[in-house]
Amino acid sequence: MTDLQNDLRGEILRGARDGLPIGLGYFAVAFSLGITAKTAGLTPVQGFIASFLNHASAGEYALYTAIAAHAAYWEVAVVIFITNMRYLLMSAALSQKLSSSTSLLHRFLLGFGITDEIFGLGIAYPGRLRPAYLYSAFLVAEMLWSSGTASGIVAGSILPETIVSALSVAIYGMFLAIIIPPARQDRVVAGLVVAAFACSFAFSVLPLLNTLSGGMRTIILTVAISSVAALLFPVREDAEGGEAA
Amino acid sequence: MSVYLYILVGALVSLFIRVLPLTLIRRQITHPFLRSFLYYVPYVTLAVMTFPAIVDAAQYPLAGVAALVVGAVLSWLGMGLFPVAVSCCVSVFAVEFLLRLF
């Protein structure tokens, strides 16, 4: 075996090692996502495919609730665009980790694999990122994510109602774990989270506003609150560290 | 059939978002408003999606409130995604178990 092959093998093994713990966490969350997908009427195969192609908890959650609500296709596109918008930033940041000679195919495939956690691995990689490392980590995590969704759809109907009820909040627990730590470090983010909770609650109870679909509510409030925050509290250059994790 | 169309729409939009900057933009985003807007978006989106939905997700609203409080406190203390998610599930299970007893 040549040095180059050895080197590549090392990258793949390291990627798989780092991807496995991520994948185990994914499996549990995807399982609860599968329960949501089941209520939207997805089959296990459809859930596997949807998870494989989207691999984004918030985006998929939005997708399944939109399917359940028979939302318009354009509405699905806008909701997924909004919920996955952070990947625009991550994709832009990851481009800075690649050597300029990285091929278009590699850029495409690396982009497809971006999730919050895989992005974290990519950013944490010392020096220029080797695509093989991230592919390996992504594939391990992705398989557990997709099969977790399919399992949730299959087992969601077998499990007793008490367990399903308990598992259905897992996804929100994960959302909290993403938004609360930055809120602790950044008062603006903390204020935004509280404002978002309050507005979202108001939109769900006020007459007229409560006729909006969940997706539209998410779009309107996200654009409105984020725009106001960006105008009032512009982010300084050095304040983006929290975004990397 | 329409389920596959939904999946396809979702997949294409996700792919577009993930791939476009990596293939096209090679410089840092410098526009102050755009940078700030994109920085705040994920937190606001996730917060809007979490509440009040978490309260309605459980069978009893009180169990959902318990999950919200437990999840927020543990996240504040720095626990990771997986342990926080599991703790929320356990709180719902425990509260609903107690509510059924009385």
Image (spheres, coloured by chain):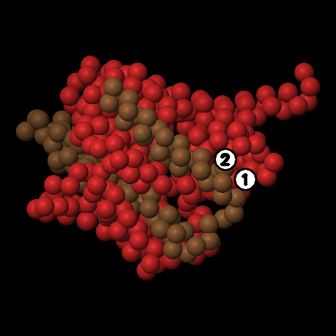
Chain colours: A red, B brown
Q: Are marks 1 and 2 in contact (CB under 8 Å)?
A: yes
Q: Residue at x 54, y 32 (%)?
A: A142
Q: Residue at x 22, y 24 (%)?
A: A160
Q: Residues within 10 Å of mark 2 (few under 14, many from 20)?
A: many
Q: Quadrant of residue A164?
A: top left
Q: Earlier in the sequence, mark 1 or mark 2?
A: 1
The amino acid type, in three-letter code, at marker 2 is Gly
The percent position of residue A197, horizontal first and vertical second, equals 29, 62
**Residue named by callout 2:** A122
- Front residue (pair B91, A28): A28
- Taking the image as shown, residue B96 lies to the left or right of residue A110, namely left
Q: Residue at x 25, y 60 (%)?
A: A200
- Front residue (pair B93, B4): B4
Residue A97, which numbered label?
Answer: 1
**Label 1 chain ID:** A
**Label 2 chain ID:** A
Q: Do pointers 1 and 2 mark residues of a single chain? A: yes
Question: Image quadrant for the N terminus of chain A?
Answer: top right
